Image (cartoon, rainbow, N blue to C red):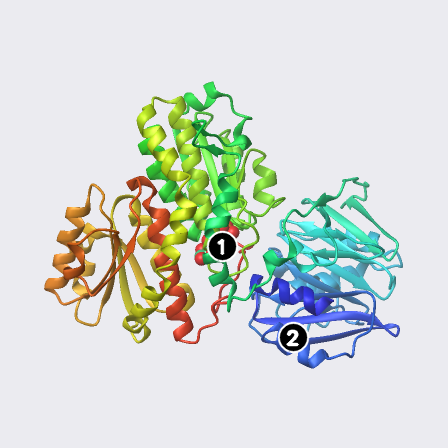
């Protein structure tokens, strides 16, 4: 059961793995550097206990070694724990424990917690843990078992996700529901500052100060096959192909072309007057979600004519941003747990901004703390490289831009054009997915290259960035995204006969300009791959390969142009034999700053 759960969670970190169970009056454990499958081989059928903990690691403190892998123990091997997060007063704690004579065997911050609990252990496990917690600064999601009380598992949450699974005479705790979703659909999301004790007969949730907290379980809404590969070689490919259905879910009940409706229910906390009088929008996110924010900026400025800025969440917090109650601050995050985005949300709230979260994971910290916002309803995204989360984030941004536009002088004609095209997007993506065989033909151009460029203009500039990010993170080919016209201000120096350049050249108001950029690349013998509009008969003679996407309102073209770029990155990575769902050094949700 533990290994099965770990396999489901492996996408969240995968440099080493380990588990511990209480068995025959002792804590038995095993750890490996590498994947859960290696741990599985090592463990075989040796462990038979009924209480255990397990972990896959994404290194923060200390290298990738067996001693640094979790679980960690106290000196007497009577306490075992797994930890997500970072203990910020690590140095002071380590000094203190060393002075007290503790023998510390790893370089991790996590091990110190086990030693600290041992300091306070006098038979009452919960009380000892609570006293130890008062010394910890930083973020921690903890699962702890002890020989003092071999029937009790303690779960602790501070700044790192933890959710309980309430089964039939069995109880679970994990950082993500997918770890135990095949055993129970009843879940309790712990909040920061809360902990839980689980025994074979029940559970109790309480604060760190031991005040009981009563919370009714929520129910998981998605089906178990959402976290299976369903016949695809990789989750990423499955998730690329799921985009039409994911988008249908995002749009359902929010967009009705026949009724002229585009409305996010999640922002009803703000009155129409408040939304009408907004002076500014700030969107903050990281990585792929930041690219969705850039697309959102174009949409909000174009449709709602509201000045919009996009900030990297990691920068936002540290630059004393100017935000107040005239600002709507939007935070986009698939996982809803990204530490940088969460910190930015807290900063904006503290400054009095109206806030809104756009998250995929239901019950996640950003969704909960934002209070107001919309879920993308893309279903679980397991592949580390984000795909369906991205397109559904763009869809929520489009609805928001239409909704605000409607309140703020957007012409009915434009409103209807965009709305009518938006509902067609899932079907149009289905057509784009049919270009998969043509995308595969392009792979040899990239297989042996170490560099490539992605160019786009206007609302397709963020798509150039996203295409480049997908390529570099899963196939390890260095890829740069650039606004097409910026190329001549520097990157053009890189172009020669070995440099593939992907140009998004759809027929929109800047099409002719992009064609000029293509000519500039041709003159320098670059190898050009174009993402073009169906029916464009000019482009084929100018480029080495073209992938055609259906015609749609220019503002909505990112939904279509991004798909071949996702497929391209996927097939290049597959041709190179890369570990597509678990690219090196990455983790699905980055819960550390
Ligand atoms: C790229 C990717 C990352 C995430 C980023 C933010 O494919 O997945 O760049 O987009 O780490 O993650 P969330 O959206 O969970 O906040």
Name the N-terminal-most of marks 1 and 2.
2
Q: Residue at x 31, y 29 (%)?
A: 414
Q: Residue at x 88, y 72 (%)?
A: 25
Looking at the image, residue 5 lies above or below residue 416: below
Corner quadrant of residue 439: bottom left
Q: Residue at x 79, y 44 (%)?
A: 206
Q: Is residue 515 visible?
A: yes
Looking at the image, residue 442 lies above or below residue 209: below
Q: Badge 2 is on which residue?
A: 67
Q: Name the one closer to the observer, 350 or 198.
A: 198
Checking the image for residue 242, the label placed there is: 1
Residue 21 horizontal/vertical position (percent) = 79, 70
Q: Is mark 2 within 8 Å of ligand 1?
A: no
**Secondary structure state at the residue bearing disc 2:** loop
Q: Name the one closer to the observer, 387 or 203.
A: 387
Q: Name the one closer to the observer, 16 or 498.
A: 498
Q: Name the one closer to the observer, 44 or 206.
A: 44
């Amino acid at each position: 059961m533990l290994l099965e759960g770990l396999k489901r969670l492996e996408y969240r970190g995968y440099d080493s793995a380990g588990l511990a169970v209480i068995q025959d009056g002792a804590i038995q454990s095993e750890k490996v550097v590498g994947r859960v499958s290696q741990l599985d081989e090592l463990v075989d059928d040796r462990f038979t206990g009924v209480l255990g903990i397990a972990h896959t690691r994404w290194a923060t403190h200390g290298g990738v070694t067996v001693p640094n892998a979790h679980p960690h123990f106290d000196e007497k091997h009577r306490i075992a724990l797994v930890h997500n997060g970072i203990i910020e007063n690590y140095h002071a704690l380590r000094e203190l424990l060393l002075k007290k004579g503790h023998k510390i065997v790893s370089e991790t911050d996590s091990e110190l917690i086990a030693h600290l609990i041992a300091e306070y252990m006098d038979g009452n496990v919960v009380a000892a843990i609570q006293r130890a917690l008062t010394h910890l600064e930083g973020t921690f999601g903890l699962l702890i078992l002890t020989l003092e009380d071999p029937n009790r598992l303690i779960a602790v949450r501070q700044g790192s996700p933890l959710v309980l699974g309430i089964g039939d005479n069995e109880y679970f705790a994990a950082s993500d529901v997918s770890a135990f979703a095949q055993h129970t659909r009843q879940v309790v999301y712990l909040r920061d500052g809360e902990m839980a004790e689980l025994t074979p007969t029940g559970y109790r949730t309480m604060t760190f100060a031991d005040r009981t907290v009563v919370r009714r379980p929520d129910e998981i809404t998605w089906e178990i096959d959402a976290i299976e590969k369903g016949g695809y070689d990789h989750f990423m490919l499955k998730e690329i192909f799921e985009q039409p259905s994911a988008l249908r879910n995002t749009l359902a009940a929010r967009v009705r072309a026949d009724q002229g409706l585009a409305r996010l229910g999640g922002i009803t906390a703000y009155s129409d007057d408040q939304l009408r009088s907004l002076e500014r929008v700030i969107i903050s996110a990281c990585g792929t979600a930041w690219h969705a924010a850039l697309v959102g900026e174009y949409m909000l400025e174009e449709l709602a004519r509201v000045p919009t800025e996009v900030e990297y969440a990691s920068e936002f917090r540290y630059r004393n941003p100017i935000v107040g109650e005239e600002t709507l601050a939007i935070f986009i995050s698939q996982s809803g747990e990204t530490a940088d985005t969460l910190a930015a949300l807290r900063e904006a709230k503290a400054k009095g901004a109206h806030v809104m979260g756009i998250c995929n994971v239901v019950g996640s910290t950003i969704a909960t703390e934002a209070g107001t916002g919309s879920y993308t309803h893309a279903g679980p995204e397991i592949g580390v490289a984000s795909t369906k989360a991205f397109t559904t984030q763009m869809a929520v941004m489009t609805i928001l831009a239409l909704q605000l536009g409607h309140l703020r002088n957007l012409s009915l004609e434009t409103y209807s054009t965009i709305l009518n095209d938006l509902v067609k997007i899932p079907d149009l993506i289905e057509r784009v997915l049919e270009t998969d065989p043509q995308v595969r033909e392009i792979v040899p151009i990239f297989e042996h290259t170490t560099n490539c460029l992605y160019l786009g203009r206007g609302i397709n500039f963020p798509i150039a960035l996203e295409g480049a990010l997908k390529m570099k993170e899963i196939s390890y080919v260095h890829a740069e995204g650039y606004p097409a016209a910026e190329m001549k201000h520097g990157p053009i120096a890189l172009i020669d006969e070995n440099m593939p350049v992907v140009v998004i050249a759809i027929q929109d108001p800047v099409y002719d300009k992009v064609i000029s950029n293509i000519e500039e690349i041709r003159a320098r013998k670059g190898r050009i791959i174009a993402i073009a509009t169906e029916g464009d008969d000019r482009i084929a003679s100018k480029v080495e390969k073209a992938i055609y996407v259906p015609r749609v309102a220019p503002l909505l073209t990112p939904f279509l142009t991004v798909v071949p770029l996702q497929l391209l990155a996927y097939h290049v990575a597959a041709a190179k034999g890369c570990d597509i769902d678990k690219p090196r050094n990455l983790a699905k949700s980055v819960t550390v700053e």
